[in-house]
Amino acid sequence: MKKEEIIEKVDLIVSRSGTSPDKVIPILQRIQEEFHFLPEEAMRRVCEITDIRLPEIQGISTFYSQFRHNLAGKHMIRVCTGTACHVKGALQVYNAFRRELKLAPGEDTDRSSIFSIEKVACLGCCTLAPVIRIDDITYGHVMPEQAGEILVDFLRRPQRKGPVSDSGLITVGNIQGEIRIGLGSCCIASGSAEIKAELEQTITESGIVVDVKQVGCVGVCHQVPVLEIIKPGENPMFYSKIKPEEVKEIVLSHFRPINPANRFRTRILSFFEKILKDGAPGTFERYPSEQRDSPLTRFLEPQCSIATENRGAVKPCELDEYRKSEGFNALKKCLKLMTPQEVIDEITASGLRGRGGAGFPTGRKWQLVHDQIHFPKVVICNGDEGDPGAFMDRMLLESYPFRIIEGMIIAGYATGASGGIFYIRAEYPLAVQRIREAIGKCYAEGILGSRIYDTDFSFDLEIFEGAGAFVCGEETALIASVEGHRGIPRLRPPYPAVKGLSGNPTLINNTETFALVSWIIRNGAASFASIGTVKSKGTKVFALAGKVKRGGLIEVPMGISIRSIVEEIGGGIASGLGFKAVQIGGPSGGCIPASLADQPIDYEALNNAGAMMGSGGMIVLDESDCMVDMAHYFLSFTQSQSCGQCTFCRIGTRRMLDILEKIRCGEARSGDLEQLEHLAHNTRKASLCGLGKTAPNPVLSTLRYFRQEYEAHLEGKCPAGKCLPLITYTIDETCIGCTKCAQQCPGDAIGFTPYEVHSIDAEKCIKCDICRQVCPVGSVKVI
Amino acid sequence: MKITIDHHRIEAIEGMTVMEAAAAAGIVIPAMCHIAGVHNHPSCMVCLVKDIGRNQFIPSCSCLVEDEMLIQTHSPEIRELRREALELLLSDHVGDCEAPCQRSCPAHMDIPRMNRLIANNRLQDALDLVREEIALPWILGYICPAPCEKACRRGTIDQPVSVCLLKRITADDDSRRRNNLLIKATRTGKRVAIIGTGPAGLSAAFYLLRSGHGCTLFDQHSDPGGMLRSHIPEERLPRHVLDAEIDVIRNMGAEFRMNARIDDRRFEETLLHDFDALILATGNEEQKILHDFGLILDEEGIRVSRTTFGATHPGIFACGTPASKNQMAVRSVAQGKNAARSADHFLRTGKPHGPMKKFNSSFGILWETEFETYLVEGSRDKRTEPAGGLRSGFTTGEAIREAARCMHCDCRRQEDCKLRNYAGEYQAHQKRFIGPERKMITKVSGHPMVVYESEKCIKCGLCVAITSREKEPIGLSYIGRGFDVRINVPLKGSILEALTRTAEKVVQSCPTGALAWKSK
């Protein structure tokens, strides 16, 4: 690209974004959108025409992982390395794609510059693990041997621009019923956009008059894509795991076509009725939504919807629907009937604690900001959910944008703030899109802006897109990032409540915390406080994933036991292997062994067990999961996300990882465990911010409960068969000689010997696990 | 407001840091990433103290005082955390404090600095520097087996720097040798007897005279020089060289009593009686007498402290061959110097004292991929052979050319590097947290005066803060994050453009040897 062209485009971007130093991140984001990377020329130009200095733009553009400094291929393959994907083999998938693209070490783009590949923290589709995303197409349940197939499939697809549209068909006439289709990120990833297209085509062709309602996340992410059919006089019927070609059959089994001209219809119908009677049709599952003891009710029954109230029943950005279900009633009640102090008292009385992880009492935080005499004040919604294995914020932002907006406005009223900022990860495009749309609608209806509901209270909201740095979940780092700096945490005190964004008193709450506010105001503090334990009130949303049968987004009352979540909601372990542990709290949390699974979900109880509430990732592990590998996985995440400021976090976590690496490779010696433990304790004591202080938790908690597994590694054994350097693949005599493994083996380690027992050449084996996965009789063994 | 630091009640002012409040009460807390007057994020963590009230460790350089704060600045736990912070930094610190040549020199001479001075044609300064550690540079310039050259990193690339000949040329001029001899001396009135006029005795005399003590050297032979005269042939060591350097010591005020056999009576009546201290630098002879005076002998010679050279009898020191057999002259020279320094300490304080052992970071072998980096500061010429032959040594021109081959492996901040000094103070071990592979060394030397060695950087960001505060048009920037974060000129610019007016300030503020003056 010519220099003049770059300059022209940069000038345009700057003229739209502004020239003050705090605009640096949005400017870089727009430049990257334009060029798919950050050309040096563009960065120089920005410095010429704005108040941004060269060292700052260099520092910021290399701090946030969203930014690229070299030209990428036409399409970007993002391999999710979130926890759920990790335990289901994301690394093998990543390596398989690299092999398919013939990438040498250090390269990330293929020779013809069509594809680039990168690992990403968590795409938030944990129930579809392992997941990859190519541009905006997501593939779930990816097997390493499918890499080539997927690339071909992607290139064959008609190119679609931008995320899925929320616009639906407009129906006129006598409505026969309602079809709800889930359009959360998991649903879309699993193909619900295609389902929706098929649905619209079926309706147009058949002339059926139904409302197609795109609802937010239903929570049953393990069963996506889902459809629910609601027809007056019939029990609502829930369909899951449907395929596009099955849509027509399903729809026509419920609704009589109005246009009798369709010749195929009767045939299809009779065929469909036949298969319904004959038993399971196609691959989908079908059961009445309210049927007792269906997998759906077993999944939903122990749950308690407050943050996820009306889940699966409302269209995310439909303001009228939100209003119909008491939406904004809480805001009106606050503005018209309550003083700010009364609002705070109500929140305090509810016992609500911050859902971001640490559990600071929300009422007290509000009070602190309220009591500041410095103005303006600002409210920030922390939606920088970055834990691998967590997607609660994403789902709440995508599905209930108005609820969170309402919570923020109420917080603004209570604390005396005049504006608010949504800080949302750039990896969540759908959430950004929906929040933007919802904010627009609120302004149009006078719910945001000046003199809300004709009161004296005015409040503005805007969005700030995070640029990819887990540490920005830490509130002072988040503020630094909004101010246009590297996301470096600073010392507290002063707390943001006293001196936050631009020195102003700042209230920062987690997305889920805001989502609970309106319910508390409407139903009263006492109702909220009646749920939960002595010190942990209300509900908690978890992203349940890993080795359970039914994963998904769940909201449970505090005090429920871990075992109930795993066994009742999750349906137990899918593989049939033993339930080993639950990883709670992501990289700051820890592993709680199955023997302690009767622990209630409660801030203090989880802390005492060496884990923490965290933001709510819950990954269930079975006996095939290695705890050293888990510790290594989480620590490598935090280590890669350290801002690099303080010695203990920057180097200490790295040295801990070095030791874990040695243990994983069987190269550790006696004394290494003690050194690891010692360094972990000191890193916890002497790191500056929460990231470093909690980074050792996964190591310390696994050492506490699974020390014998570490000791086994010292002797060169990985009991779970997970740590590659310590395992070998072999084929036993049950092999039927089908050659499937030999055909798939990327390393030519298995000879093509039809009808004979195959064998693996350990020298050539790259331990990609493909043979084990393709073997039809389970003859491939890991020892 | 009132706060308590280590049981001292201190009146503190709001807005003060804990470190400032402590300093006001005379409590010194170590710090690397912090200097007064520069606003910087805390990072190094050696300033950790304990906030007893919150039961937390806090960086005192930036935590502000709060009313009734209870602070502890010393405890085994705090010491351990500080030491561990240093060890973590050291595990990621690729660089040598002292160059391998200096570390392998028994006399511990600062060879790279000598090379820099010679390369700049500052031979007098070079000689003065050499004499800080070696009393007989001209002599050793002929006979030293030069262990330094075996350790020289240039040797891994082509051939080592010709250190021995370079040292020789610093002293090969009469007038140069006469200059700056007693510059530091103020006369103490103390008298020291030295038995033996070999390399150890001469060396001891040189340093004692420089410290202002009177010196009398005893020798049973008619001419001073010991084994330098008796065992080394004229072809290797010209006698005029030997005589000239002995004359230097004589001119400094040493009294030589030749043909003086030390017997029992003389030892007791003269030496122990008339002198304030006694240094035995006798060679192999006279061991019996020494034994008779209660000095314990073993196979190696007289038993003395390996660090202070003090013998069992206070005020008696031993060095040279009696302390250990079969050694290089340079080792005798070094021992004479150390015995003299210990004796000097004894004369001033009543107690002997060994040389201070300083912390030394070292990274070992230079990789082939780093040759280019290292050659940036060294001339690419082959080793210079003196045109007039080995015996006549280098001409000044040859010396300048040869000295320019030095690659400056030493750290040019080894005196004031805070990382080194605290590592010594906290007894940190560099290898405790050794990583799988060290980082590759880089040297940024595009600035005529400043050299930047990024692998010595502890990422404190003081230079970034200063260039930003001083509004350098380009300045320095953090690049990347986490473990891989580094500091450099933005967008691959040159360091010359980056430091237009702040070179002095950033070099001064750098707590390690990452940023240094090239010519130091």
Image: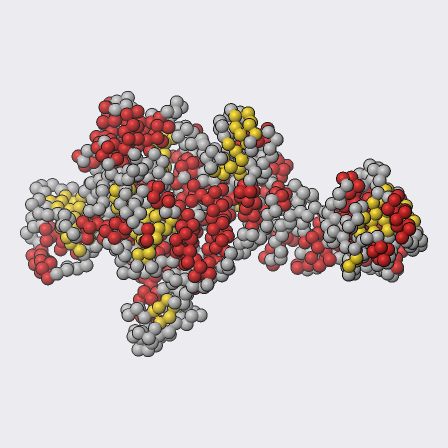
How many numbered dots are placed on residues in this image? 0
Residue at 22% x, 46% y is A302
Q: Nearer the viewer, residue B267 or B472?
A: B267
Residue at 76% x, 52% y is B304
User: Quadrant location of the C terminus of chain A?
Assistant: bottom left
Query: Measured from the top left, where is residue B437 in percent x and y?
Result: 54, 56
Residue at 32% x, 53% y is A595
Does residue A350 appear in this view? yes
- In the image, residue A514 sits, relative to residue A654, either above or below, namely above
- In the image, residue A320 sits, relative to residue B380, either above or below, namely above
Query: Measured from the top left, where is residue A48 in percent x and y?
Result: 49, 36
Q: Nearer the viewer, residue A287 or B120?
A: A287
Query: Is B303 positioned to the left or the right of A346 in the image?
Result: right
Does residue A76 appear in this view? no
Query: Is B220 positioned to the left or the right of B461 in the image?
Result: right
Query: Measured from the top left, where is residue A152 in percent x and y?
Result: 31, 60
Q: Nearer the viewer, residue B357 or A381?
A: B357
Query: Measured from the top left, where is residue A15 in percent x and y?
Result: 40, 34
| Figure coloring | secondary structure
Residue at 23% x, 53% y is A223
- To which quarter of the image does residue A408 belong? top left
- To which quarter of the image does residue A176 belong? top left
